Amino acid sequence: MNNQDEKKKTKKQFWTALITQALLRGGIPFIIMGGIAFLLYFQGRYGDAKGTFVASLIAFFVGAATVIYDIDHWSFTKQSGVHFLIMLITVYPILLLSGWFTITSILDAFKIFLLFVSVGVVIWIVMCILAKIFSW
């Protein structure tokens, strides 16, 4: 096996491990919360079941996307930007479709976007501080 083949194999192993980690980090909370939603549904608590299931979807994507920060050859700026884009195309639409917000106009969707960004920035800052403190 030549050097080129070794690099391809190593790259494939890296991405396979990253995807596996993403599925674990997102899948575990999704399964737990999805199970709770399932139980709530069969107890007749349909609103609670829906809310818990929506939260499980958000937890899946948030948890899975954390692997972005394990890509050491990317700059922190690139990691943060890619993470934001992943959240934007997964979590933001879930928020819009969740029924948690009244949406009657594009302005309402924009207000939800501003809330989405504001909460994201606060969580990002807190996690950066914790990462420095605990050397993550």
Image: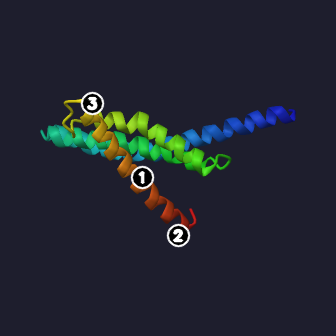
> Which residue lies under the disc numbered 3?
106
Sooner in the amino-acid sequence: mark 2 or mark 3: 3
Label 3 element class: helix
User: Which residue is at a point 39% across and 56% down the rendered structure image?
Assistant: 122
Which residue extends farthest left?
A: 44
Q: Residues within 10 Å of mark 2 (few under 14, many from 20)?
A: few
Residue type for callout 1: Val
Mark 3 touches mark 1? (CB < 8 Å): no
> Which residue lies under the disc numbered 2?
133
Q: Nearer the viewer, residue 77 or 55?
A: 77
Residue 40 x %, y %: 19, 43
Sooner in the amino-acid sequence: mark 3 or mark 1: 3
Q: How many marks?
A: 3
Q: How did the renderer colour the structure?
A: rainbow
Residue type for callout 3: Ile
Q: CA distance from mark 1 to mark 2?
A: 18 Å
Asked if residue 129 lies left or right of residue 93, the reply is: right
